[in-house]
């Protein structure tokens, strides 16, 4: 069966759940959002359109079991020469294993960072997701696997899981030399569970108490299937720490992440000259501040500012005893803008992104998001 037909079939199932949800009581829940934006980035062609449409549904056949699924449609177009990207964001069965713990199995969102699992447009202020949680930590990042979650009565949440691996063969070597690519974003599964070889795992701990401070940390360790026969499999590690502080109208958030990939030199030696090499080291962090104390016509108007420093290609493995490719310089971006709650579930966003080192990508952005 063609992938387009499979994707369409999945969407039809979800739409059926949406239709049934109105009269099915508490057993069904339907949700989603539409995200439209326009960008005018320096050095890039301007773009405008429906960036993302997410349709989700949850079915609870009995008190302690739930089935949840989300389908994401990106870059929606009707042109015969272009195609809409359709993928499963998450789809899993969840079973209560105690008063405050659950076991999940299926396609899971990795609990890494602030946005994974919390990536609806009302979970962040900017038009698009920040660069660190795009280039360094993929968002949304999903893997096939099994996970266990525990919530305590004191505000702590613990996540543990075993998942499928990543795939080094998906590295986009056709990219121009020096182009910034997301190492994990290039290797993560998109429309499949991922390689069964190289079992991976994650652990995450977060504190969400009643006070103004929330914080957490997470670690992902896993395997990456070799790009071709005869090359060694790689190992991937990614760790991050984050915090968010809220008091009155003020909000401050910060995150730092660092990752490493082994056995990249063997792959890079097979790539044509002039193409982008797979990095061994990558890192990034940001701080963001917002003030939720303004009103416009009775609706919340939130100005924000964010500083990011990140590098998706900070270092490479030596290709020979005398040749070690130089890592790329860090990129710095300053983003300032406003978010306006036009309606209860409608957000209007405007911002300007400025790359402080002169890199391409600076420019204004506008966004409109509808949650349902």
Image (cartoon, helix red, strand yellow):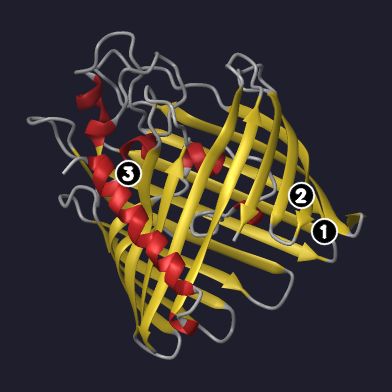
**Residue 276 horizontal side relative to residue 266, left or right:** right
Q: For residue 3, what is the image quadrant?
A: top left
**Residue 12 horizontal side relative to residue 358, left or right:** left
Which residue is more in the foreground, 255 or 114? Answer: 114
The secondary element bearing badge 1 is classed as strand
Residue 104 appearing in the image = yes
- The residue positioned 51% from the left and 31% from the top of the image is 311
User: Badges 3 and 1: C-beta atoms under 8 Å apart?
Assistant: no
| Residue 106, x across and y down, in percent | 28, 64
Please name the residue that numbered disc 3 is placed on: 190
State which quarter of the image contains the N terminus. top left
Residue 119 appearing in the image = no
Q: Residues within 10 Å of mark 2 (few under 14, many from 20)?
A: some
Please name the residue that numbered disc 1 is placed on: 250
- The residue positioned 69% from the left and 59% from the top of the image is 345
User: Badges 1 and 2: C-beta atoms under 8 Å apart?
Assistant: yes
Tell me the CA gap for discs 3 and 2: 32 Å
Please report whichever mark, 1 or 2, sits nearer to the chain's N-terminal start: 1
Tell me the CA gap for discs 3 and 1: 37 Å
Mark on residue 289? 2
């Amino acid at each position: 069966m063609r992938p387009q037909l499979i994707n369409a079939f999945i969407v039809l199932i979800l739409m059926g759940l949406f239709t049934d949800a109105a009269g099915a009581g508490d057993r069904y829940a339907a949700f989603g959002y539409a995200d439209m934006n326009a960008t005018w980035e320096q050095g890039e062609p301007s773009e405008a359109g429906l960036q993302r449409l997410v349709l989700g549904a949850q079915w609870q056949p009995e008190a302690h079991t739930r089935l949840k699924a989300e389908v994401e449609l990106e870059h929606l177009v009707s042109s015969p020469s272009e195609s809409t990207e359709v993928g499963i964001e998450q789809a899993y069965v969840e079973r209560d294993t105690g008063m405050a713990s659950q076991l999940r199995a299926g396609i899971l969102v990795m609990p890494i960072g602030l946005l994974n699992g919390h990536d609806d447009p009302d979970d962040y202020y900017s038009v698009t997701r920040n660069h660190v949680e795009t280039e360094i930590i993929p968002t949304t990042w999903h893997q096939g696997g099994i996970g266990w979650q525990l919530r305590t009565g004191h505000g702590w949440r613990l996540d543990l899981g075993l998942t499928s691996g990543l795939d080094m063969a998906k590295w986009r070597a056709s990219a121009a030399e020096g182009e910034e690519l997301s190492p994990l974003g290039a290797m993560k599964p998109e429309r499949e569970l991922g390689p069964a070889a190289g079992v991976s795992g994650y652990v995450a701990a977060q504190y969400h108490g009643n006070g103004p401070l929330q914080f957490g940390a997470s670690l992902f360790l896993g395997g990456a299937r070799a790009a071709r026969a005869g090359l060694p499999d790689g190992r991937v590690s990614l760790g991050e720490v984050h915090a968010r502080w809220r008091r009155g109208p003020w909000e401050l958030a910060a995150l730092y992440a660092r990752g490493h990939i082994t056995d990249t030199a063997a792959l890079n030696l097979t790539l044509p000259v002039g193409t982008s090499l797979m990095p061994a080291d990558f890192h990034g962090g940001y701080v963001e501040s917002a003030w939720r104390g303004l009103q416009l016509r009775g609706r919340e108007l939130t100005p924000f500012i964010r500083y990011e420093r990140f590098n998706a290609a900070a270092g490479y493995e030596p290709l020979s005893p005398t040749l070690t490719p130089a890592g790329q310089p860090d990129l710095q971006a300053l983003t300032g803008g406003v978010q306006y709650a036009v309606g209860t579930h409608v957000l209007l966003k405007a911002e300007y992104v400025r790359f402080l080192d002169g890199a391409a990508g600076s420019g204004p952005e506008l966004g409109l998001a509808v949650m349902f």
